[in-house]
Every structure is written in C-alpha cells, then in structure tokens.
Image (cartoon, helix red, strand yellow):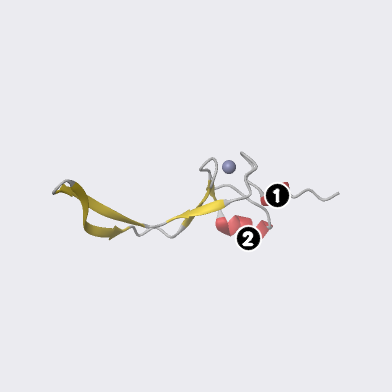
Amino acid sequence: MMSENKFKCPVCNSRYFLTRPNRYDILEFLDGKYKIVTSEFTNDEDRIFCRECGSEIDERASMENKRVILQY
Ligand SMILES: [Zn+2]
C-alpha cells in the first residue's frame, strides 16, 4: 500500500500549506484606529510554510523529489 505521507508535512502530518505574503503594511494609530501609512514589500521570493506547525517548506526540493521537503 502506498503511503501518502510524502504529501504531508514531515513534522506534523498536515496536508495544508500556506504562503506568507511578501508584503506588509505599516500602521499608525490615529484618531482611535489603526491606519495604513504605507505598504512595504520584501525582496524575498514567496515562501511556503506548513499551515499547522509553521515549518518552512523547500518548494524546489519538494518539486524535484515529489514529496514534501522542509527547508533547512
Ligand atoms: Zn507541519
């Protein structure tokens, strides 16, 4: 029987992953609420993380090996 564990996070077995947007907003607390002053972008490429435990995934290695591989 073929295991599907290779399609899951090796740490916590989650099958779901998420991207972390390489953009963030700078906020200022004005007039009783947070307002966006500016948005900044990081120069990082989009990265992938386990949805459950936050382990970073090595997207390239995962595609090459056809299994979920963590970033080291
Ligand atoms: Zn995980």
Q: Nearer the viewer, residue 31 or 71?
A: 31
Outermost residue on the left side: it is: 31
Name the side, left or right, on which 38 lies relative to 2. left
Q: Position of residue 49 (x, y in %)?
A: 51, 49
Q: Position of residue 12 (x, y in %)?
A: 62, 39
Kindly check if marks 1 and 2 are in contact, taking CB atoms under 8 A apart as contact. Answer: no
Front tag of 1 and 2 = 1
Q: Which quadrant does ligand 1 occupy?
A: top right
Mark 2 lies on a secondary structure that is helix
Note whether ligand 1 is within 8 Å of mark 2. no
Q: Nearer the viewer, residue 20 or 66?
A: 20
Note whether ligand 1 is within 8 Å of mark 1. no
Name the side, left or right, on which 5 lies relative to 33. right
The amino acid on which the numbered mark 2 sits, given as a three-letter code, is Met
Identify the residue shown where x is 62% and y is 56%: 62
Specify the quadrant of the image occupied by residue 66. Answer: bottom right
Q: Earlier in the sequence, mark 1 or mark 2?
A: 1
Mark 1 lies on a secondary structure that is helix
Identify the residue shown where x is 66% and y is 48%: 8
Q: Which residue is mark 1?
A: 6
Spatial CA span between label 1 and label 2: 12 Å
Identify the residue shown where x is 26% and y is 59%: 39
Q: Which mark is residue 63?
A: 2
Q: Residues within 10 Å of mark 1 (few under 14, many from 20)?
A: some
The amino acid on which the numbered mark 1 sits, given as a three-letter code, is Lys
Outermost residue on the front side: it is: 32
